[in-house]
Each structure stands twice: as structure tokens, then as C-alpha cells.
Amino acid sequence: MKKKLLHTPEGVRDIHNEECAKKLVLQSRIHDVLNLYGYSDIQTPTFEFFDIFNKERGSVSSNEMFKFFDRDGKTLVLRPDMTPSIARTAAKYYGETNSTLKLCYLGNTFINNSSYQGRLKETTQMGAELIGDDSLDADAEVIAMVIDCLLNSGLKEFQVEIGQVQFLKGLLNEAGISDDAEEELCELILNKSYFGVEELLNTQNIDRKIAETLLLLPQLFGSVEVLEKAKTLSSNPQSLAAIKRLEDLYQLLKVYGYEKYITFDLGMLSKHAYYTGVIFNAYTYGTGDSVVKGGRYDKLIGQFGSDKASIGFSITVDQLMIALERQKIDIPLDKSGTLVLYKSDDRNISIHLSKYIRSIGTNVNMIHHDFAKNIKEYIEYAKSTNLDQILNIKTDKEVEIINVATGVSRIANISSLMGGNNE
């Protein structure tokens, strides 16, 4: 039984040592970009009331949530999605202001995936939300920020695929498909079940040209030229306005100099039904899933009592780390720390020496010298904990300085290491 308890439940994992250190560095790189764009940090609870994420909000399905009850019998869930949580806080704390909000976050989300999917059930999400701005400029800023985050992570080859929810909505409105059939059709498109799409359309009494356009959706992806093709397939104002928005967005992204990272997919949908306009995913080599998801959600915050047009994105840090590792893109770690080895008789001087070294900004790991271990074992330990030198205290006046990388050592005076002060 004790050995069984050493293992984690399916879908979650421990992250430790160098991997954990690299994850923290990666998160710091992304956070730097979010701050450079003027986004302020926000934290929301790990669990919230079920209704924050219910079907009407357009978040994930109920059977994908981890649900439990508080002592009053109210249903709570581990957050499966950050955006509704941010929407709730925006309505609560900023509902009366018309100012634009720029918020960023770091937190874990929890999705109860089926075991056969092989996906993590707990993942780390970093992202940003631009709230109170329905402009094209907001769309472009958010997508440019995604690209800068990925570049700063170390990625060199990736694509941001952009779609537009209103293009499909316009086609469906023109077709006059019932709400139930529309929901089923969107589910089939989302799951790439194109034979299912054809089957469903054959049961609907809709214009043949619109049906043909809907069947062409899987082929409407690629470079900006696909937008020209899309304009020839529909004449309804809603769909054409969606295409125009994408064309204008592309021109703005060219100003940023990021057009080479952009492709379009007019058949793109999201399992998050709260998206109302531009949606996007970012893909790179080495992972089968997107590393970034995002889009415009102009009606979500209104469900919490304060209408605010908004757009945002989330980066799945775990997926990004997998991609970086498989592309052999290293995340350098700071190896400037010191291991102080001391004997019981030299405890006091080791404390003074360690305090001094920390006071000048270097991290120190103090360890009582176990003479059952040889110095090579301590060198290996220092390497595994990203320390670059060992100070092996010999007496209250002398210390052996060992370079961890080379193993070369020399004797020095402790007083000289402390700027002449070893009190």
C-alpha cells in the first residue's frame, strides 16, 4: 500500500529538479513579455462554483470537470478554464469602469479527460486578457503578443492559425439551420467528422450552394490567399464582414512584421462556445496539440452582469516544454550558486561565510560534511542542483574552492572571500 501511494493518479505528474527549474525559467520568459505589453497580474481561485463554467457560459462540458461539494451542498469545480474566472472578476471588480483592462495570469487548470486520450488532466496555463476593447487593434496586439511569447520561449518555427467564428455563423444563418442541427453540425466540424457533416447536411432542406460551401470548410485553410477564395463562396453580409476583419487584421500584423507566422483556417472552431469573432491556435513541431489557444469573446463578461468586449489567449506551458525538448531547444539555467561544506567544529564560520555570500546576491546551499561520502559525490550533487562551485571549509581560516565544472580546486583565505571581514 505504501508503494502504491508513491505514484500519482492517472493524468497528473510530479515535476522536479532540472525540469522544474526549466519550467520556471520558461514561465519567467513568457511573463516578461506579458509585462512588457503592459499587462498586470491577476490570480483567481483554483476552485469556483459550478455555474461559473456551466453550459450557458460556453466552457467545457460538465463531464470533463472535476466536481465536488462544499459543506453547504453547493457544487464546486476545479477550474477547467481560466477565461470564465477572469470574466467573473472583471465583472465584479471593474464592472462600473469603462477603462480598458489588460490582465495576465499563471495557474493550473483541470480537465477530466478520458484515460485513452493520454492527455494530462492538470496543466499549467499562462495567458492574457484584453478587456473592454472591440477594436481590430486589440485583435492584432493579442496575436502579436502570442508570437512574441513563443519567440521569447526559444521557438523558431511555429504558425498561428486564425479563424473567424462569424464566417460560419453567417453561413448557418443564411442556411436557416435549426439550433439543434447547428449544434450537431458544429460538433461534427470540431471533431473533423466530415462524412458526418455531409450526412447531416443531406437531411437538411438548405440551399445547395451553401451546403457545398459548408462541405468545403476543411479545405479553406492556408495563406492569406484563402481569404480571396472564401469571398467567392458566400454573399451574406455576416460572412463577408468576417473575411474583411481577417484581411484587415493581416495588414496590421504585417505592420508588426509577423505575417510569416500567420495562416488562416476558416473551418476552425473551438470547444469553447463563448468565442464570438476571431479565434486562433498556435502550433509547432513535436507536439500533437496546439501550444496556444485564444480568441474574441464579446458576450461572456455580459453573462456576469457587465458587457465588455474582450479577447485573450492561454499558453499551455506543459505542451510548450514538450515542443522545446523535442526540437532540442535548450532552456539555459543559472549555475552561479555555491555549495558550502562544513564540519561541526566549523559551523559558526560557515554560517557567517554563507550569510556574506547571500548578501552579495549568490545563492548558497549549506551541507554538513558527511565523511562517508567522497568529494566526487558532492561535485555530482552540486551539478544536479545547478551550483558552480563548492566551498569546502578546512579550518576557521582556510577553505578549499572547487570548480564544479572542471573539478579543479585551490586553497583560499576565508577572510579574503568575505572582503576582509570574518567576524
Image (cartoon, helix red, strand yellow):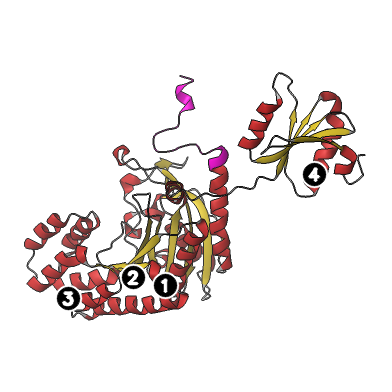
Residue at x 36% of width, y 43% of height:
119
Image position, residue 417 (x, y; %): 85, 43
- Report the mark closest to the observer, 4 or 2: 4
Residue 122 is inside the magenta segment: no
Residue indicated by mark 1: 139
Residue indicated by mark 2: 277
Is residue 305 visible in the rendered image? The answer is no
How crowded is the residue under tag 3: few (<14 C-alpha within 10 Å), some, or many (20+)?
some
As helix, strand or loop, the secondary structure at mark 1 comes to helix
As helix, strand or loop, the secondary structure at mark 4 comes to helix
Do callouts 1 and 2 mark residues in contact (Cβ within 8 Å)? yes
| C-alpha distance separating marks 1 and 2 | 10 Å
Do callouts 3 and 1 mark residues in contact (Cβ within 8 Å)? no
Image position, residue 305 (x, y; %): 43, 67
| C-alpha distance separating marks 3 and 2 | 19 Å
- Tell me which amino acid carries mark 3: Leu
Image position, residue 222 (x, y; %): 28, 67
Q: In this view, does 153 lie above or below 137?
A: above
- Report the mark closest to the observer, 1 or 2: 1
Foreground residue among 180 and 39? 39
Residue at x 46% of width, y 42% of height:
72
Residue indicated by mark 4: 357
Residue 7 is inside the magenta segment: yes
N-term mark: 1 or 2: 1
N-term mark: 4 or 2: 2
Query: Which segment did they paint magenta?
Result: 1-19
| C-alpha distance separating marks 4 and 2 | 55 Å
